[in-house]
Amino acid sequence: MLAKKIIPCLDVRNGRVVKGKKFENIVDVDSPEVLAKYYSESGADELAFFDITASYEERKTSLEFVKKVAANINIPFCVGGGVSTIEDFADIMASGADKVAVNSAALKNPELLKEASLKFGSKCVVLAIDAKRNDESSWNVYVKGGRERIDLDPIEWAIKAVELGAGEIVVNSIDEDGMKNGYDIELLKRIKASVYVPVIASGGAGELKHFYEAIEYANVDGVLAASVFHFGEIKIQELKRYLMDKNIKVIL
């Protein structure tokens, strides 16, 4: 069994790491390079960096901050936000990222996933899915930082994206984002059972058991979180020791 990955997430707006609940009530946390260095030295397996207003503001990812973060870490680094062309992939990776996450643009132009995977390899192409439950006991995909609903089922979208070349799926529950009630296990299970690439859980971690539940019950390959790490409520090494005690394979 491959080791499960612990991934802190930096949601960046105007050059600062921020955090909210259900994509609202945003509060300031710290500078991205300071947090990135801290997580790299604390045992994080990877780091995620999302320029959360880039797509909504119709601009590119801030490469200045990508470069600053890359200079302060020695772990794999995924960047998303405002990615819409193959040139964006190239610019972000040239700035120090190992992987590029795409969300809104992949829905507008699914061929972008294929083009990027052919040029950079599928392992460098990450599909980020923001999903929210609907009134039909299912989910809808959302774009532009959770502002716009798409008439598309996230499970179906994950399957199609992998067929096109996505090498990893990050599944973020808008309902659970920042709520600390646990990940959306049902959604994660459905997507994990439908694709053969790594699936990363995002949105909802509030205590140690939530990470375990996502790994044990949904069989995800990694768990991503923000506020519980940013505010020191859970330390990464504490989480890893907890998971090891539960017979979950992690790298200390």
Image (cartoon, grey):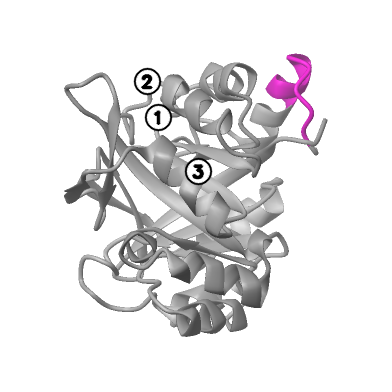
Q: Secondary structure at mark 3?
A: helix
Q: Quadrant of residue 243?
A: top right
- Residue 224 position within the rendered picture, expressed as x and y whole percent measured from the top left: 53, 41
Q: Secondary structure at mark 1?
A: loop
Check if mark 2's residue and mark 3's residue have beta carbons within 8 Å: no
- Residue 125 position within the rendered picture, expressed as x and y whole percent measured from the top left: 57, 62
Check if mark 2's residue and mark 1's residue have beta carbons within 8 Å: yes
Q: Report crowding for label 1: few under 14, some 14 to 19, many 20 or more residues within 10 A (C-alpha).
A: many
> Where are the magenta residues, as a range?
241-250
Q: Report crowding for label 3: few under 14, some 14 to 19, many 20 or more residues within 10 A (C-alpha).
A: some
Per the rendering, the mark at residue 102 is: none
Per the rendering, the mark at residue 159 is: 3
CA gap, disc 2 to disc 1?
6 Å
Residue located at (43% from left, 27% from top): 187
Per the rendering, the mark at residue 181 is: 2
Give whichever of 38, 133 is nearer the camera. Answer: 133
Which sits earlier in the primary sequence, circle 3 or circle 1? Answer: 3
Question: In this figure, which residue is indicated by the disc labeled 1?
Answer: 204
Whether residue 174 appears in this view of the structure is no
The type of residue carrying mark 1 is Gly
Give the foreground label among 3 and 1: 3
